[in-house]
Image (cartoon, coloured by chain):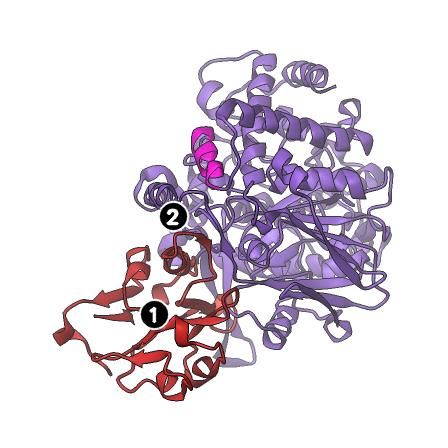
C-alpha cells in the first residue's frame, strides 16, 4: 500500500482507563485489505476466548477499506464484536457517513476496549479522542434526541458521522442496534447492547484528508468509469428508483414472502405495501450514504394527528426498505402503510433490529393464539395480527421487560422458545431471526451456514430464483455456489464496497482500483484472500461455539408453500453435512 | 461564470460534488474541497449546500492582511497561495461558511467557479451559468 496512506493507522481506545493510542498496522492491511478482513484479525487478537460479550474485555472493532474515500459506493464500515445474541461472531455493516468519516479522520480501524463507569460518548477529531460525559443523555426515550445534542455540541458539520444507541442498547436487549446518521444501522447481532454494556452512548468522528493515488490520470479515468455505471447504467436502477421494496411484489407473486409468521407465503392484501405503491403514495424524499450517488435510502412522511387537537400533526420522516416492510408489515399482518410506518418509527426510537423485533412480535402473537402463554406474561396487552398500536406497546414492554417472559423475549426468539416452547414456529436460524426470504432450500442453507455477515442474507435466494424454480441442483452444488460467492463478498466488504454495488465491482475492477492505492493483487490473488478471510471468520465462530450439529430448524419452513417446492429435511441436512466437511 | 445552487431540496447528501471538487488536485479524499453539504438540523430535515457566491465586493478579500485574496472583475476572488499566511481571517469573514480550509496546508480553499461539482451532481442541485449576462447576483 502507499507509504503515506493513513489507512494503516489503528486507533485503540480504552474506556476503562480513558486512554487512546495509535498503532501502525501496515502488515495487517497489506494482507487483508481492510474492512471485514482486517476487523476479523483484530477481533482474533483482542477478544479473549469464551468471554462474556458484556465483559469489559470484550472488544468492538470498526474497520474501513482502501477504496473508502477514493471511489464511489465504497462507503461501508464493518463492525466486529462477539455477539450477545448468538454468542459467536458479531459482524455488522453500515453506511451513512461512518466509513468516509473514519477514513477522513485518518484511521483504517478503531478498536474500543474496556468499560466506562459513567455514561460517555467519544468525540474523535484532529487526532485526539475526547471522553465526553453522557450522563444527561442516558435513558432518553427517543434515541434521536441524544444524536441531536451531540450534533449541537460538536464540530465537523457535513463531515462527521454520529453513532448512537437507544434505550434498547442501554437495557442490553441482545438485538439492539447502533444507529448512524438517523437512517443507517449496525443492525442484527446486538452491537447496541455491547455499547450499552460499556456505558458507551455513542461516538462522533470527523476529518477531511487527502488520499494519495499512484497515478492521477488513471485515477480520474477509473473514477469516471465507476461513477458513470453507478449513475447511468441499469445496474443500480433498482436501488435508485423504487428501492429494495421492489421485491415485495415479486416475492409475494412467487409465494416467497413471509406472512403472519410464515403461516403463509403470499397474501392478496399486501398491495399497499409494495414498493410501487409506497413510492406512489408515501415516498417523500431519498437520501444517500456519503460518496454514493445512488441514494437508495427511501423516506416516507408519517403524518399523525393529535387526539386532543385536530389542527396539530406530528410529522416524522421514516425510512423504509424491503426488510422493514417484511418484518414490521407482512410478518405481523400489518398491510396499512401508515400503521406499518408507526411501528417502524417506534422500533427506530428504541433502537432495536427491525427484523428480529418483527419475528419476535409474530412469534408472540402465535404463542397467544395457541394458548402457550397467558395475558399475564405480556402484562395483559391485547395482541392480534395487524394491530400496530398494540405492537407499539409491546415493543416498549420488551425493551423494558418486567415479566420473565418479556425478559426472555429481550434475548431473542430462540432463547424465548427454548424456555416457553413454540420452537417449531420460532423463525430463527443460528439463533438469529429470519430475513424476508422464503425462496427455497438454497436460501435456508445460506441462513444456516452463517456464511454471510449478520444479515443472514446470502446468495441463496438468488440461486433459488435462478436455478431451483424449474430445475433442481444437488445440495452439494448449492453449498459450493454459496461458499464460492462468499469468497468474493469478503473482498467487497474488505475494500469496503456496498453489496448493492456488486454488479459494478468485479474482481478485475477491484484489482485496478487497489493498484492506485499501491496494492498489487490480481484477480486470483484477491479470490484467495477472500477465501482466507472467510475461513478466518469461521475459525472465530467455531472457537466461540458455532456448531453445525447444534443448529435447530423450525418445522414451519417445511410446511409453508415455497416457489421451488424443494424445501425438504433431506435437502437441508445433506447440504449441511457437506458444508461442515468443506469448512472444518 | 457563476456557480449556484438551483434546488437544495433535491440534494441527497451523496457528497459527489465535494469529492469531485477535491479531486481537482488529482488525489482522492476531501482535503481540497471548497463546496460543502451539511444537514439542515439532522438528515431527516434535508441538506444545506454551501458554495461561494462570488461576491462583487468580497468580505474575505477585504479582511486579508497580506493581499493573498485578489478580487476578480466579475466577482469572487483568487488565492495567491505564496502570499497567504494562513491567519484564517477570510474564513471568519464569510458568513455563509463558503471559505473552506485545507487543514494539511493550513490555507483556505477558494472556489474558482469551474463547475466540476455541478458536472458530478446526479440530481441537478447545482448549476454553472456560463453566460455572464444570465448571471443574477440576487
Q: Position of residue B106 (x, y in %)?
A: 50, 70
Q: Is residue B67 visible?
A: yes
Residue shown at 40% from the left, 67% from the top: B34
Disc 2 on helix, strand or loop?
Answer: helix
State left or right for residue A222 relative to residue A500.
Answer: left
Query: Measured along the vertical axis of the image, is residue B106 above or below residue A583?
Result: below
| Disc ID at residue A240 | 2
Q: Position of residue A545 (x, y in %)?
A: 82, 31
Residue A437 in percent (x, y) is at 55, 34
Which labelled disc corresponds to residue B111? 1
Specify the segment rendered in magenta.
A507-516
The tint of chain A in the picture is: purple
Tell which tag, 1 or 2, sits nearer the viewer: 1
Alpha-carbon distance for marks 1 and 2? Answer: 30 Å
Above or below, A517 against A429 in this view is: below
- Furthest residue toward front: B82
Tag 1's secondary structure?
loop
Q: How many marks?
A: 2
Amino acid at each position: 500500500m502507499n507509504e503515506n496512506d493513513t489507512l494503516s493507522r489503528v486507533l485503540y481506545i480504552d474506556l476503562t482507563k480513558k486512554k487512546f493510542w495509535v498503532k501502525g498496522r501496515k502488515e495487517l492491511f497489506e494482507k487483508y485489505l481492510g474492512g471485514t478482513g482486517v476487523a476479523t484479525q483484530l477481533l482474533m487478537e483482542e477478544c479473549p476466548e469464551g468471554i462474556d460479550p458484556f465483559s469489559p474485555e470484550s472488544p468492538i472493532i470498526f474497520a474501513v477499506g482502501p477504496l473508502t474515500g477514493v471511489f464511489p459506493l465504497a462507503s461501508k464500515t464493518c463492525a466486529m464484536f462477539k455477539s450477545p445474541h448468538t454468542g459467536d461472531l458479531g459482524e455488522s455493516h453500515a453506511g451513512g457517513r461512518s466509513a468516509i468519516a473514519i477514513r477522513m479522520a485518518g484511521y483504517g480501524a478503531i478498536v474500543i476496549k474496556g468499560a466506562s463507569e459513567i455514561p460517555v460518548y467519544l468525540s474523535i477529531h484532529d487526532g485526539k479522542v475526547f471522553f465526553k460525559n453522557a450522563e444527561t443523555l442516558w435513558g432518553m426515550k427517543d434515541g434521536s434526541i441524544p444524536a441531536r445534542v451531540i450534533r449541537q455540541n460538536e464540530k465537523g458539520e457535513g463531515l462527521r458521522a454520529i453513532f448512537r444507541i437507544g434505550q434498547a442498547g442501554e437495557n442490553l436487549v441482545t438485538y439492539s442496534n447502533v444507529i448512524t446518521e438517523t437512517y443507517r444501522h449496525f443492525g442484527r447481532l446486538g452491537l447496541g447492547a455491547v455499547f450499552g454494556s460499556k456505558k458507551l452512548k455513542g461516538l462522533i468522528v470527523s476529518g477531511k484528508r487527502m488520499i494519495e493515488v499512484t497515478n492521477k490520470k488513471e485515477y480520474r479515468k477509473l473514477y469516471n468509469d465507476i461513477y458513470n455505471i453507478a449513475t447511468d447504467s441499469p445496474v443500480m436502477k433498482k436501488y435508485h428508483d423504487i428501492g429494495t421494496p421492489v421485491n415485495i411484489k415479486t416475492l409475494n407473486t412467487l409465494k416467497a414472502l413471509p406472512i403472519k409468521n410464515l403461516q403463509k407465503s403470499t397474501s392478496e392484501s399486501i398491495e399497499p405495501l409494495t414498493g410501487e405503491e409506497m413510492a406512489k403514495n408515501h415516498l417523500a424524499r431519498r437520501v444517500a450514504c456519503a460518496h454514493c450517488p445512488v441514494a437508495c435510502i427511501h423516506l416516507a412522511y408519517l403524518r399523525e394527528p393529535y387526539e386532543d387537537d385536530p389542527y396539530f400533526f406530528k410529522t416524522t420522516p421514516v425510512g423504509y426498505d424491503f426488510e422493514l416492510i417484511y418484518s414490521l408489515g407482512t410478518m405481523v399482518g400489518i398491510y396499512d402503510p401508515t400503521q406499518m410506518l408507526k411501528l417502524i418509527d417506534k422500533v427506530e426510537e428504541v433502537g432495536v433490529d427491525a427484523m428480529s423485533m418483527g419475528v419476535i412480535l409474530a412469534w408472540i402473537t402465535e404463542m397467544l393464539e395457541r394458548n402457550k402463554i397467558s395475558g399475564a406474561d405480556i402484562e395483559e396487552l391485547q395482541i392480534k395480527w395487524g394491530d400496530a398500536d398494540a405492537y407499539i406497546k409491546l415493543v416498549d414492554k420488551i425493551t423494558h421487560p418486567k415479566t420473565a417472559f418479556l425478559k426472555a423475549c429481550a434475548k431473542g426468539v430462540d432463547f424465548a422458545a427454548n424456555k416457553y416452547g413454540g420452537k417449531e414456529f420460532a423463525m430463527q436460524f443460528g439463533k438469529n431471526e429470519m430475513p424476508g426470504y422464503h425462496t427455497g432450500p438454497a436460501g435456508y442453507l445460506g441462513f444456516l451456514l452463517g456464511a454471510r455477515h449478520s444479515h443472514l442474507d446470502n446468495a441463496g435466494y438468488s440461486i433459488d430464483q435462478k436455478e431451483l424454480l424449474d430445475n433442481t441442483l444437488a445440495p452439494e452444488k448449492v453449498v459450493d455456489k454459496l461458499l464460492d460467492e462468499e469468497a468474493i463478498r469478503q473482498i467487497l466488504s474488505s475494500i469496503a464496497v456496498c453489496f448493492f454495488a456488486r454488479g459494478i465491482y468485479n474482481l478485475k475492477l477491484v484489482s485496478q482500483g487497489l493498484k492506485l492505492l499501491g496494492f498489487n493483487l490480481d484477480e486470483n490473488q484477491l479470490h484467495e484472500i477472500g477465501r482466507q478471510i472467510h475461513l478466518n471468520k469461521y475459525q472465530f465462530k467455531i472457537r466461540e461455539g458455532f456448531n453445525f450439529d447444534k443448529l435447530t430448524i423450525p418445522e414451519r419452513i417445511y410446511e409453508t408453500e415455497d416457489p421451488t417446492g424443494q424445501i425438504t429435511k433431506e435437502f437441508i441436512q445433506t447440504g449441511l453435512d457437506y458444508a461442515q466437511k468443506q469448512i472444518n | 461564470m457563476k456557480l449556484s445552487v438551483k434546488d437544495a431540496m433535491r440534494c441527497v447528501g451523496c457528497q459527489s460534488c465535494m469529492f469531485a471538487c477535491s479531486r481537482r488536485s488529482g488525489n482522492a479524499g476531501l482535503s481540497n474541497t471548497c463546496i460543502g453539504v451539511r444537514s439542515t438540523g439532522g438528515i431527516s430535515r434535508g441538506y444545506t449546500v454551501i458554495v461561494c457566491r462570488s461576491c462583487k465586493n468580497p468580505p474575505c478579500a477585504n479582511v486579508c492582511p497580506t493581499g493573498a485574496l485578489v478580487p476578480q472583475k466579475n466577482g469572487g476572488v483568487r488565492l495567491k497561495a505564496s502570499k497567504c499566511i494562513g491567519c484564517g481571517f477570510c474564513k471568519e469573514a464569510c458568513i455563509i461558511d463558503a471559505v473552506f480550509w485545507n487543514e494539511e496546508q493550513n490555507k483556505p480553499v477558494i472556489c474558482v467557479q469551474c463547475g466540476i461539482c455541478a458536472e458530478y451532481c446526479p440530481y441537478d442541485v447545482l448549476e454553472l451559468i456560463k453566460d455572464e449576462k444570465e448571471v443574477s447576483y440576487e
